[in-house]
């Protein structure tokens, strides 16, 4: 139990602490972040970097009425620790425990449930304008945004709007030079120049003094002055960008010097108009390995052993290969084979396991930064030029690019391959990160081919197939270990399902990740005397009407199974086709994610909750056929 941290029931208690105690509290907060990582994986390095900033903000403002939005929200742990959630902190990212992101159901200090980057400035501005309209104009509104999230298009839309409105809004740019990987793009260079401002300002003064004192003459003195002037001009350009947009740019300032941070925040607090305070922090601050390797320590494996001074002695590595591994290997092969193939990620090189692609194909690998909408339109441009772009984007984040999918890609019928990682229930990240909706929103658009591998063996053939198509193709796969159904795999053909086994009593039609579970379910049910077939649907658009309408017509039960939302998903596609063909659809049962946001828990727990695990699928089949569960039959033992 941390001595000071346990005394902080709410931010008001911070005011009871002396400056020395606040330094001690920051240490305790870092210790707690380390301790929890000995239990389970959590976001780490970003949280270590904002401890002082978090304390300074809560000491300067009163966020029981003022407004604070942490952009993205993965760096909200220190804020949780001092807003009444320290005692439950150990439960973070577990079923029924604290969320790893802001959650208004947990605390009034969390205003929005977020997890997607780039929305903080817009929401803070909206809060400010709303508060003014509704008679709470005295409330301050603060957005904290990282330099990784800053280049998102929506942030510039918000800065532009805020600069025009001229309201009192404080945007804190938390600049640690990192996204998850090193930050990319021109804006980063601009911030680097701003970092040098103080240096150049100091240099200019010192050099002018020096030149005044030294007997320098002619070219030497002129050259020296020119160089300094250029440097100063360049350095100011960083902040100038924001100034031109109507913000007062202040900084850069040290984000780990708590007294100085507090002074700066007090200074800017009551100034009118929009202000951008540029704060320099170190990602991983206070844990040597994390600051040296912030990429690994963004969300590291669990700590096996921690030594003195928060030295991480050992990480618990290992684990089985995931769908991401199979997809990234196939993307690598595609680039090896075809000079036109290009890989694109929107700041998720590490998550998409594309580091090797980045290293070996530097001219055909593009990290756009956290800019999914741009990434999609960029891919469209590449495709139009004749290249074969593969955009590897998490299902949930592709939602940021909905209109680009429609206009730039689908409407032009351009051959962009979308590799949708984390499609389905992503586990402890929770509702902001579950990839529930992609099948629905991609099915909407004419020209799109929408696919999902049934298992490991489908992944690479699907990516190869996609690259041979003349229009857009999406391939979704889960955040899960690879599974394999041993079989003579049939080749991927447009709109063709793979019939694993015809049934007599019914059939499970699996779209994507739950195909192996359906195969096991059919095996179990067979031992209970039910002959249930299994189909690996592979395509949600176009669906295999020949096969699927045949089973709807012939079999007493058709159960569609998908790890995606039911409204408009694969099962709906089967219903639509059956309805259009004039078939009875009453014996079609759809299993998937219901019409509600799903909380955070382990993926296996969530699958069980939603009846999408082995037991749940078997039970749905029995229930539909009026068969008894073996649990209910006296003397029999469940095979499930
Ligand atoms: C729209 C969207 N795309 C991608 C991500 C994945 N993501 C989570 S944190 C992060 C890096 C954020 O960098 P930055 O804003 O600089 O914050 P830092 O972690 O450096 O404090 C990324 C890419 C996301 N959360 N949202």
Image (tube, helix red, strand yellow):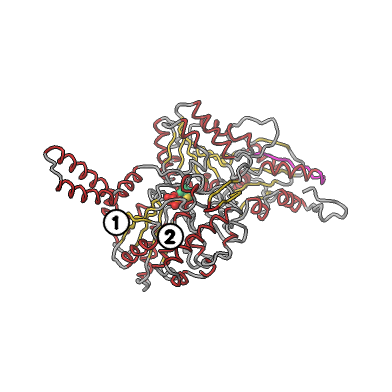
- Residue drawn at 41 percent across, 34 percent down: 382
Classify 10 Å Cα crowding around label 2: few (below 14), some (14-19), many (20 and above).
many
Query: Percent position (x, y) of residue 311?
Result: 53, 50
Of the residues under marks 2 and 1, which one precedes in the sequence?
2
In which image quadrant can residue 498 be found? top right
For marks 2 and 1, give the CA distance: 21 Å
In which image quadrant can residue 92 be found? bottom right
User: Of 305 and 233, which appears nearest the observer?
Assistant: 305
Q: Which residue is mark 2?
A: 52
- Residue drawn at 39 percent across, 65 percent down: 127
- For marks 2 and 1, give the one nearer the viewer: 2
Outermost residue, left direction? 218
Indicate left or right for 288 with 274 as reference. right
Check if residue 305 falls in the magenta segment: no
Relative height, residue 414 to residue 292 (above, below): above
Outermost residue, front direction? 214
- Residue drawn at 52 percent across, 43 percent down: 351
Q: Which residue is mark 1?
A: 249
Indicate the secondary structure of the residue bearing disc 2. helix
Check if residue 529 falls in the magenta segment: yes
For the record, the magenta segment spans 527-536
């Amino acid at each position: 139990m941390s001595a000071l941290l346990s005394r902080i029931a709410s931010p008001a208690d911070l005011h009871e602490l002396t400056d020395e105690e606040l330094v001690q509290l920051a240490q305790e907060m870092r210790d707690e972040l380390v301790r929890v990582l000995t239990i389970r994986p959590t976001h780490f390095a970003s949280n270590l970097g904002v401890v002082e900033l978090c304390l300074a903000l809560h000491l300067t403002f009163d966020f029981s009425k003022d407004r604070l939005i942490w952009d993205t929200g993965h760096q909200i742990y220190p804020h949780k620790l001092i807003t009444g959630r320290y005692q439950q902190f150990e439960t973070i990212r577990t079923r029924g425990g604290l969320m790893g992101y802001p959650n208004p159901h947990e605390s009034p200090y969390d205003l929005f449930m977020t997890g997607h980057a780039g929305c903080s400035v817009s929401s803070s501005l909206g809060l400010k304008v709303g508060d003014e309209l509704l008679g709470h104009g005295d409330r301050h509104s603060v957005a904290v945004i990282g330099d990784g999230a800053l280049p998102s298009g929506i942030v510039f839309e918000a800065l532009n709007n805020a600069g025009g409105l001229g309201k009192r809004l404080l945007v804190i740019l938390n600049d640690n030079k990192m996204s998850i990987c090193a930050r990319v793009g021109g804006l980063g260079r601009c911030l680097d120049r701003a970092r040098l401002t103080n240096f150049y300002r100091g240099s200019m003064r010192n050099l002018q003094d020096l030149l005044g004192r030294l007997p320098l003459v002619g070219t030497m003195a002129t050259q020296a002055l020119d160089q300094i002037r250029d440097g100063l001009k360049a350095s100011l350009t960083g902040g100038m960008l924001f100034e031109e947009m109507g913000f007062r740019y202040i900084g850069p300032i040290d984000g780990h010097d708590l007294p100085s941070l507090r002074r700066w925040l007090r200074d800017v607090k009551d100034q009118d108009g929009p202000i951008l305070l540029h704060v320099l922090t170190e990602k991983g601050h206070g844990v040597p390995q994390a600051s040296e390797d912030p990429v690994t320590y963004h969300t590291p494996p669990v700590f096996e052993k921690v030594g003195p001074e928060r030295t991480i002695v050992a990480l618990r590595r290992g684990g089985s290969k995931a769908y991401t591994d199979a997809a990234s290997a196939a993307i690598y092969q595609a680039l090896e084979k075809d000079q036109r193939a290009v890989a694109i990620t929107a700041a998720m090189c590490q998550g998409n396991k594309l580091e090797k692609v980045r290293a070996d194909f530097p001219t055909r690998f593009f990290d756009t930064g956290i800019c999914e909408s741009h990434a999609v339109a960029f891919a469209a441009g590449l495709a139009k030029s004749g290249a074969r772009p593969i955009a590897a984007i998490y299902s949930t984040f592709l939602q940021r690019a909905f209109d680009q999918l429609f206009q730039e890609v689908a409407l032009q019928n351009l051959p962009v391959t979308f590799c949708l990682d984390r499609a389905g229930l992503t586990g402890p990240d929770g509702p902001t990160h579950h990839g529930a909706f992609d099948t629905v929103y991609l099915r909407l658009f004419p020209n799109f081919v929408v696919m999902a591998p049934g298992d490991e063996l489908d992944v690479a053939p699907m990516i190869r197939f996609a690259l041979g198509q003349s229009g857009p193709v999406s391939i979704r796969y889960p955040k899960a270990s690879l599974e394999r159904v041993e079989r003579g795999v049939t080749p991927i053909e447009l709109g063709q399902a793979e019939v694993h086994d015809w049934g007599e009593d019914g059939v499970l039609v699996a779209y994507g990740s739950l195909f192996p579970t359906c195969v096991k379910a059919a095996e179990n049910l067979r031992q209970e005397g039910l002959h249930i077939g299994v189909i690996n649907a592979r395509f949600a658009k176009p669906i295999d009407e020949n096969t699927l309408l045949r089973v709807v017509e012939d079999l007493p039960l058709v159960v569609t199974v998908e790890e995606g939302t039911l409204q408009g998903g694969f099962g709906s596609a089967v219903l639509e086709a059956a309805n259009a063909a004039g078939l009875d659809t009453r014996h079609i049962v759809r299993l998937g994610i219901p019409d509600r946001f799903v909380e955070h828990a382990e993926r296996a727990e969530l699958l069980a909750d939603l009846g999408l695990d082995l037991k749940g699928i078997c039970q749905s089949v029995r229930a539909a056929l009026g068969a008894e569960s073996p649990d209910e039959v006296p003397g029999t033992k469940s095979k499930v």
